Image (cartoon, rainbow, N blue to C red):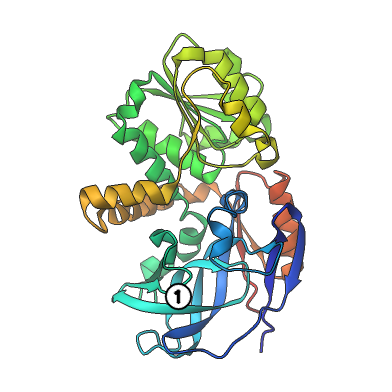
Amino acid sequence: MTTPIQMQVNKRDFRQVRLVEPETKPLESGEVRVAIEKFALTANNVSYAIGGDDVYWQFYPAPEEWGVVPVWGVATVTESQNPDAPVGTRLHGFYPMANTAALRLQKKNDMQFREVSAYRVPLFGLYNEYGNVTNHPKEMMDFENASCLFVIFMTSYCVADYCDANDFFNAEQIVVSSVSSKTGFGVAKLLKDNPKCAAKIIGLTSAGNREFVEKLNCCDSIVCYGDETAIDNSKTTAYIDFAANTALLGSIHHHFQDRLVESCLVGFTDWEGFEGMEALARELPGAAPHFFFHPAHQEMRDKEWGEGVFHKRGMETLFRLISENSHHWDVQWINDAETLVDKWKQLLDNKVPGRLGLMVSLSS
């Protein structure tokens, strides 16, 4: 029998990590225990750690100063007190960095469950949804690893839809930072391919990732960090920020001044450059920087379009992006907790190349 294991990070020092054996309590009615088969490890998980105090630490609580970073993965029910989710049920959803978890599930329909533990009910519904992938056809099974790695394309779809809903801010150009990240790529690609978007898409990336981004064909032009002031500042410009670096944000705002009509922070690939962001944001020229929160936009669309419509359109977009573009990424498997810790620290230090997709399996 596999020993239960969970990775926890210090909420104030993300490089301080510990591996613990989580407490295993007897299941109550409605609960299941799952073996987490696999999950993806991406820069998006760093964003979850950054936003942990407000949202993400709450999904899988840990003691005192420790937090559990959630991940997207697939798990199989190994023990059940829920007749709607018997042993063998396979679920795609939001899990801890671990090899096991307990969930309290309520069946929505044949394809979906909702986590209904009392402490999770007030949390954003998106993260409480678990897809039933037990009887997926083979062609869907082939997408399973990619769906873990690229579920963040749902955020790409959400940000692109936010731009669409705001008429692309009537901007002549849209600058997307960290365009080598999966979510940054997704936003740039969706905007570039949208016939309603007349703005030119400019991708910002590091010199080391430039060649990779060129292969992605997601931008009209590519600019390396440090050269952002070479971008034409006579044009109205929107900025979609996945880097969260204060120096870069200041450079962008001071370069475009009042021609910067939108400044939207989505991700934190340069999370250590984030310090002082809120204070800086109040002093910058141009549009006031603001945070983008995927679940809030989705809830707005659910009210406008009807429950489930946004999710359906997003999933269609996700699978299209996966089928057309996943070959650009090389998948690397992590099969033990010590390597997971090492890769987590590499991710924090921006030492994971953009072309790599990290998948983790701690179940063996």
Left or right side of 260 for 284: right
Left or right side of 310 for 67: right
Which residue in the rendered view is the most extreme toward the top? Answer: 234
SS at mark 1 in the image: loop
- Spot occupied by residue 22 in the image (x, y as percentages of width and height): 67, 78
Left or right side of 23 for 220: left
Q: Quadrant of residue 360?
A: bottom right
Q: Quadrant of residue 130?
A: bottom left
Q: What residue does disc 1 label?
A: 117
Asked whether 167 or 63 is in front, the reply is 63
Q: Quadrant of residue 69?
A: bottom right
Residue at the (37%, 22%) spot, across then down: 199
Mark 1 Cα within 10 Å, few/some/many (few <14, many 20+)? some
Above-or-below relation of 292 to 123: above
- Spot occupied by residue 145 in the image (x, y as percentages of width and height): 50, 63
- Spot occupied by residue 278 in the image (x, y as percentages of width and height): 59, 33
Residue at the (51%, 13%) spot, across then down: 257
In which quadrant will I find the C terminus?
bottom right
In which quadrant will I find the N terminus?
bottom right
Residue at the (53%, 65%) spot, across then down: 59
Please say whether residue 158 is visible from this viewpoint.
yes
Amino acid type of the residue that numbered disc 1 sits on in the rendered structure: Ser
